[in-house]
Image (tube, coloured by chain):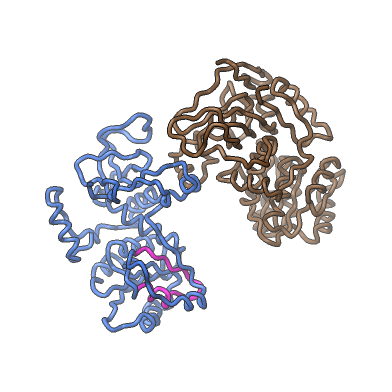
Chain colours: A blue, B brown
Amino acid sequence: MLLGHEVSGVVSKVGPGVKHLKVGDRVAVDPHTTCRVCEFCKSGRYNLCPDVFFLATPPDSGALARYHVHAADFVFKLPDNVSFEEGACVEPLSVGLHGCRKAGVTLGSRVLITGSGPIGLCSMLCAKALGAAAVCVTDSKRLQMAKSAGATHTLQIPPEATAEELAPKVAELMGGAPEHTIECSGAQFSVNLGVYATKPGGTFVIIGHGPKDVSFPVVACVAKEITIKGSFRYLNTWPTVIEMISCGKIDVNPIISHHFTLEQTLQAFEMAKSGEGVK
Amino acid sequence: MADNLTAVVYGPKDFRLENLERPEPGEKEVQISVQSCGICATDVKIYRYAKLTGLDIEMPFILGHEASGIVTKLGKEVTSLKLGDRVAAEPWRICRYCDLCKSGNYNLCNVKNLGKCLARYVVLPEDFCHKIPEHIDFETAALAEPLSVAIRICTRAGIKLGDHVLVLGSGTIGIFTMQTAKCMGAASVTITDCLSERLVHAKRLGADNTFLVKEQSIPELVDELAKLIGKKPDVVIECAGAKPTIELGMKITKPTGCLLVAGLGPSRIEIPLFETLLSEIDIRGSLAYTNNYPRALNLLSTGKVNIKGMITHRFPLEKVEDAMKLFEENPKDLVKIIIDCSVE
């Protein structure tokens, strides 16, 4: 099976019944091809379709190739001022946007983002585009890119810290506890930090995939009325993200750290595995 | 086989009952032998004017969208239905690809089309045919359609536990809206009409208060109804599509409440818009339904919604034009007309 699900390209052939695209159109691709008939598809939650074909998720093959065929309604035109690289980044940005929407990020929000990898950074970019007043990114290591890409605050997690001890430092740093937290690392520590640091009554969205069972302070959630939501992939995000890139509200270029050709794919995966780059 | 007797509108008042070919089911579709089909105000408007506000329709147009029947043929890849299954037919064909379909708003699909159920046979997508329990008859199952409309009306109106609800108009939609509001936990539902016969049905079917509208002015109505309810209602649902009832709704809904205009009226009316908006009253519309059939069938099969006495007139498909004319005459004892489309 092929890998690759963060795709942009040029339409080279159009199947019967396709009306909104023509050969030569520059496009970005939402990796879903859904069943369209189940209750999830029909109630506007196609990201939960149980019969979905999703690029590069076994057994479904991906798009890391010269040519790829895709359902046309999941393919979106790119304006001339959006590059192919930016077009490919619509996918991780969509993960961030979907998480921010679920978290209720809005004008004036204070947002905590745990994890400074591509998803954390994309969530940060979306939170800022949504009008957040302060976005703090935490990580144990790589925070320089968070800062240069636009985070208002960053917090390096000391090796011996506990989440409960670190939580008040987040509030101090941000000028108040965050009402919205988005977990993008999968680390148990960060799940705990999310519960302790989020303001009472706030929303804590978990995107990161970590170990199956995680220990975290349920009673704190209850007493603070923290709403915990899972966020899976994305839903109807491509048009919005493309428009935000086009009008300059989102600049994803700072997080693109490395370039490889298709022939150098193996090296690219090795670089990604090393943790040295971002996108 | 050209034995599919079908009610077709070709132009204003140019209506023909024709024997067409039976439609064949494509992939993931089924053919249904229609048993019962209800007549609705929209059918009669199309019959009379060959057009309908808010819906793009082309002639020739096959009427009928409130149907139930028996599965008689299966298309390829049908997995959830078998021959002989008794179903309520949700009469939409949607594109499934547009942004409205993909955001759960298939009732607003750009290219949807509706109906074609006033016939012996109809073909629909498998996922729009909903199995009905054994103890529900075909006439009751056909009413799942207007009940689904009422469910969306109540959902869009935001009815919550403890709300006081006022329904203006006691036809089929008004009565179903009244019952659905009660199922959603309304503290009280008051229903009005200008025909006392209709209020008798509403009272029997569960309305907490009924109110007969006579010659009262709108300020008088606001006063009397607010006294009857005990306060200005949180939610008002207008089911008549008429200027006076819409204006009454605007004046009586409590500030920050919701006025849901469900009735179909003239394209333009003069209303006191700004006073209403400045009271932060939400004025909303509602079109058809999305994903409501399972709930409607559950309400009918558990008896939480009662249809007893609502079907007041019945006609065989051969006499459907008589049914249209009766609807236009609007006799006092009329609530719901059901057409028997079955082959005998």
Instruction: Tell me, yes or no, whether the highlighted magenta stretch contains residue A197.
Output: yes
The number of numbered badges drawn on the structure is 0
User: Which residue is pictured at 38% across the width and 67% down the height?
Assistant: A182
Where on the picture, by quarter, is residue A141?
bottom left
The spot of residue A244 in percent (x, y) is: 36, 53
Residue B66: image location, x then y, percent: 64, 34
Q: Front-most of B141 and B243? A: B141
Q: Position of residue A122 (x, y in %)?
A: 32, 61
Q: Is residue A18 above or below residue A140?
A: above
Q: Quadrant of residue B263?
A: top right
In this picture, residue A117 sits left or right of residue B261: left
The structure residue drawn at horizontal position 60% and vertical position 20%, both measured from the top left corner, is B4
Q: Where, quadrant-wise, is the N terminus of chain B in this rendering?
A: top right
Write down the region rendered in magenta: A190-208
* A81 vs B196, nearest the viewer: B196
Q: Residue at x 24, y 47 (%)?
A: A84
In the visual, does A29 lie left or right of B219? left
